[in-house]
Amino acid sequence: MDSYLVDAQWLSAHLEQPQVVIVDCRFALSEPDLGRQQYEAGHIPGAYYLDLNRDLSGPVQAHGGRHPLPDWQTFVRTLNQLGIFSKPPQGPTQVIAYDDSQFAFAARLWWLLRYLGHEQVALLDGGFEAWKAAGLPLSTGIPEPKAGDFKPQPQPDWTVDIETVRQRKDQPGVLLIDSRAEGRFRGEYEPIDPIAGSVPSAVNYFWQDVVDDSGRLKSPAELANHWSDLDSADEVIVYCGSGVTACVNLFSQAIAHKPMGKLYPGGWSDWSSYLT
């Protein structure tokens, strides 16, 4: 296994290990309750469910974007209830996250855990569909909360705010990446936020371009080629609509063995909130 990527066969073989915690991150932006309903209808045995809005994000304010980073004390309590340990003898716990959206929501959890210093986190390649396609079992059982001992070690230099983006976006050597679809980047349409467009000086790297037609991540060699422009950049800042799918690009940069960019969590939803 790659340290940040596992396949369904690996997960099936390690399903019963007490040091493995599985998290279902399925979600639909257009139907916020759908992911939970899908989880209750059937999930990978032993998996817990974390909701993008309730668990992986904080309260929405006038500015800061549609999915602000979570309140860290609350988030750490949630991680403890999943039985996640940071250190021996019980830890470090290996966390496996999955969704059914080409890593869109599972990558958010991957990034959050790594931001808090937990490196033992991987995504299920191909997600829930790959598990089902392999003929592996599903469960409707909801695991009981546990008592973990997660010790956060935040990496504050992994994020930038709107003021930092304003100051650095035009500087030589700064690569500002917009992770949204090309049409949204060009301002041709905007299905979510009130204003269409993108941050001036940004370049477009659509997050879905890092996966293949089956929803699996492209090879490290393909991703290294995809992210070759990072080699000449002094600083890389990545954003999307609200700091969620940008994490797929950040995840793929790590798999490509490139220096991972910084996240602008507010993204276009934060930037555009100052334009109204």
Image (spheres, rainbow, N blue to C red):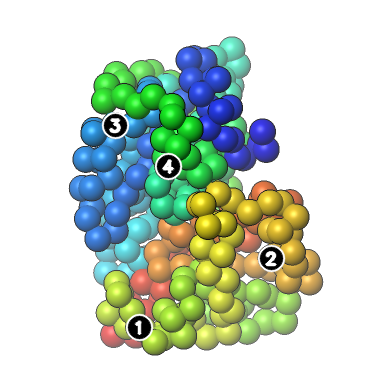
Residue displayed at 51% across by 62% down: 208
Q: Are marks 4 and 1 in contact (CB under 8 Å)?
A: no
Residue 187 rendering spot, x and y as whole percentages: 41, 86
* Near-viewer residue (169 or 3): 3
Q: Are marks 3 and 4 in contact (CB under 8 Å)?
A: no
- Characterize the local packing of mark 3: few (<14), some (14-19) or many (20 or more) Cα atoms within 10 angstroms: some
Q: Quadrant of residue 266?
A: bottom left
Badge 3 or badge 4: first in the primary sequence: 3
For label 3, the residue is 42
Residue at the far right in the pictured view: 232
Residue displayed at 67% across by 82% down: 171
Residue 24 rendering spot, x and y as whole percentages: 38, 37
- Characterize the local packing of mark 4: few (<14), some (14-19) or many (20 or more) Cα atoms within 10 angstroms: some
In front: label 1 or label 3: 3
Badge 4 or badge 2: first in the primary sequence: 4
Badge 4 or badge 1: first in the primary sequence: 4
SS class of the residue under badge 1?
Answer: loop
Mark 4 residue type: Glu
Q: CA distance from mark 1 to mark 3?
A: 35 Å
Mark 3 residue type: Gly
* Near-viewer residue (276 or 145): 145
For label 1, the residue is 189
For label 2, the residue is 226
In front: label 4 or label 2: 4
Badge 1 or badge 3: first in the primary sequence: 3
For label 4, the residue is 129
SS class of the residue under badge 2?
Answer: helix
In front: label 4 or label 1: 4
